[in-house]
Amino acid sequence: MDQNNQFEFEQNEQYAPMLTVKNARYFRGRAREALKGNWVTASVMSLVYTLMQILTVAVGVPLMLFMLLATKEAVGTERVLFLFLAVLAGYGLMFAVMIFVIAPLTVGYSHVHLKLIDGQTPEIDSMFSYFKKAYWKSVGIAAWQMLLAFGCTLLVFVAVLFERLLSGWIGDSKLLFAAFFAVFTVAWAALLLFVLYRYIMAPFILAEYPEMRAIDALRSSATLMKGRKWKLFCMQFSFIGWGLVWLLASIVTLGLGGLVGQFVLTAYMQTSLAAFYHEAANRDASKDVEFPSIDPDDYVVD
């Protein structure tokens, strides 16, 4: 393979999207195998990652509440403006933390689970390594994902506005509003999931190929997930049983068991996702070539 093109995906329609058919049980089993002897380490890393995500909310909500309290004396249009600015400031700060702090941490978190899949025991500090390498690339990936998610959400507001205009023409109807809300909520969820799964592998790709540009990582993820979105959805949905166990443990132990179980379950699910990426990208074959590619079609043998 040409070294200059080692990171490029090439469409090849003569091969099936998945080289080998694997089901959810396989990926969960692959994750458990990788986590043998590493459950504590992986759970601690999940704890750190979750706490950092909680920080995202923690920095935005107080600002929002402070600004809302400042609007107590305002009335009319001024109060509406202050409310809008409070929400905008709170969410803006949360989005900023997610993009500039959580994004490189997510790439590092993906790197940790790839090491687990490779049979290695990762160090906790390796989760923060992408603040030094590929930082702005990880920021670019997160910014693009959030922009697309915002666009999907914006479509819902446009749909509700259209319903309000339509109700003004034909008369207000609760049934009409309920129908519109149901249809566009389902459409929004489907579109959001499509966008999420299209680019879900970008952090793994950047973790493995930090030299790659952010846009190439996104394009590579889109190509890699072609024909695999439903399979990944089914794999992640298969954890619903464990989710119910976690909920029961939370109720029985008054939250303590659920708190611990959350980090264990998160580690389990993330390792399964890494196993999915490992299989989809055919990483075993890529280890045998000088200039590896993450396009599994590059390793198909006639």
Image (spheres, grey):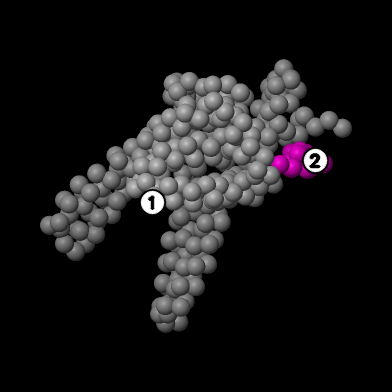
Q: CA distance from mark 2 to mark 1?
A: 48 Å
Quadrant holding the C terminus: top right
- In the image, the segment drawn in magenta is 11-22
Tell me the residue that label 1 is attached to: 251
SS for tag 1?
Answer: helix
Question: Which numbered dot is residue 292?
Answer: none
Q: Position of residue 73 (x, y in %)?
A: 12, 57
Q: Is residue 273 visible?
A: yes
Residue at the image position 58 percent from the left and 21 percent from the top? 120
Is residue 15 covered in magenta? Answer: yes
Question: Which numbered dot is residue 15?
Answer: 2
Q: Is residue 283 left or right of residue 80?
A: right
Residue at the image position 39 percent from the left and 50 percent from the top? 252
Crowding at label 1, few (<14), some or many (≥20) Cα neighbours within 10 Å?
few
Residue at the extreme right of the image, as rendered: 302
Quadrant holding the N terminus: top right
**Dominant SS type (magenta):** loop
Q: What's the amino acid at mark 1?
A: Ile
Q: Nearer the viewer, residue 49 or 67?
A: 49
- Camera-nearest label, 2 or 1: 1
Q: Position of residue 128 (x, y in %)?
A: 44, 24
Residue at the image position 54 percent from the left and 61 percent from the top? 187
Q: Is residue 1 left or right of residue 41?
A: right
Crowding at label 2, few (<14), some or many (≥20) Cα neighbours within 10 Å?
few
Is residue 152 covered in magenta? Answer: no
Q: What's the amino acid at mark 2?
A: Tyr
